[in-house]
Amino acid sequence: MKDDRVANPAAEPASDGHHRPEWVPERAGEAEGFTTNVMPGIKSRHDGLPGGASLETTIYPATGKRPELTVDEYVDGVLSGNRSILARAITLVESNAERHREKAQEMLTRLLPHAGQTIRVGITGVPGAGKSSVIETLGLRLCERGHKLAVLAVDPTSSVTGGSILGDKTRMEQLSRNRGAYIRPSPSGGVLGGVARKSRETMIVCEAAGFDVIFVETVGVGQSEITVRSMVDIFLLLQIAGAGDELQGIKKGVMERCDLVVVNKADGDNTLRAEAARADYDRILHYLQPSTEGWKTRALACSAYTGDGIDEVWAAVEAFRANTTASGVFEKRRQQQNLDWMHNLVLEQIKRSFYGNANVRLNMPAIERQVIGGKISPTQAATLLLALEADKDGVRVMAPKTSP
């Protein structure tokens, strides 16, 4: 087959300043619908939103490396509501690099006095229940009322590749374009409970940036999602019709930890089924102890598609906040969550210190081979490793005792 393309190896800019591709067909300029020009990009300081003003942020070259910000720059940028610096601050918090950890903690310490004046809502449910759709419909209404909403959408991390799709934002197309909302997808990092490991720190950063409503959307994997209960004020469980009978509902551990059950997709031909499911969950909740002292967990029905029942859902959230604030439960829960956070950080630091110990790293492969070969039990191996970690005599190799 004849190749009618001609080479342009130099690919240098033409006299008009446009660049030519390396390969172009003959008489390309004469062919209708074919271009040999690569148009330069438009240098703009506009964010693309209708009616938006020019951004007062530094624009860095696409090929250059952005300079690292100081703690002062992070703090000032977050407090001023700069979205670009807010995103970089969250990335700093989520980083596992040692050189970022100290800077992130200093930043969080300085932002902490500006955080906390929010309502934190955890939203969980089975895959397909419509979590992202409900968040968008509810979020748009909150923005219309003058609220500033931050959505922390957590996506599952693959145990095979270690990657995450981070696709929840694509389901919130209208909300992501709203100036009153900020959506941050984050990988779960393999953490059980359906939340990211640094979700608590991320909430503090968003609150300091001026957001007064925080939604935490979990990955939607099952009963382990109750971990989100330890970091939010109100826990909302999203359900759909046909998810099981009353007995199946009672068996779900997450039912005992939620403060509000919402049956979604109550529209069209599914309206009656959704209302029947809501009534079933109301009966279930009658036999369960309420998750929050002084608050009776209730079941509601709504439609993220039509918007029916969405206002009632938020009215229930506001009623919960008023009730628990008046009784002191709201503040007490926040205090307990801070203590739980502290203990979790202690355990995380102990784990990091243990596996980072030189003696443990040196002897771990040999001890693992002993366990695999059946020469010592896992319990003996754990005892040896703990003894090595506590050894203060320097780095040494310890030969594990073998069973007779």
Image: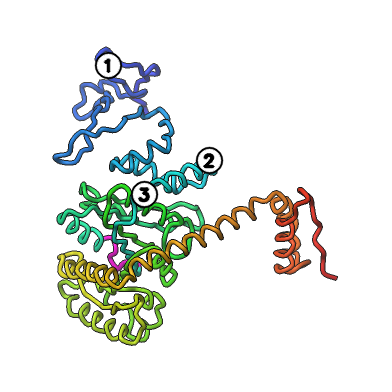
Label 1 – label 3 distance at C-alpha:
45 Å
Q: Earlier in the sequence, mark 2 or mark 1?
A: 1
- Where is residue 321 drawn, in percent x and y? 26, 68
Magenta residues span 127-132
Q: Residue 99: where, in percent of width, then height?
A: 53, 40
The furthest residue to the top: 15
Q: Residues within 10 Å of mark 1 (few under 14, many from 20)?
A: few
- Name the mark nearer the viewer: 2 or 1: 2
Farthest right residue?
404
Front residue of 124/68: it is 68
Considering only order in the chain, which callout, 3 or 2, is on the residue closer to the N terminus?
Answer: 2
Element at label 3: helix
The mark nearer the N terminus, 1 or 3, is 1
Q: Nearer the viewer, mark 1 or mark 3?
A: 3
The alpha-carbon separation of the residues under discs 2 and 3 comes to 19 Å
* Res 374 → quadrant: bottom right
Q: Nearer the viewer, residue 155 or 99?
A: 99
Question: Which residue, given by chain and number where applicable, does mark 2 sit on?
Answer: 99
Q: Which amino acid type corresponds to the residue marked 2 in the rendered image? A: Arg
Q: Amino acid at mark 3?
A: Val
Q: Nearer the viewer, residue 372 or 393?
A: 393
| Residue 152 lies in the magenta stretch | no
Looking at the rendered image, the quarter that the N terminus falls into is top left
**Disc ID at residue 17:** 1
Residue identified by numbered label 3:
205
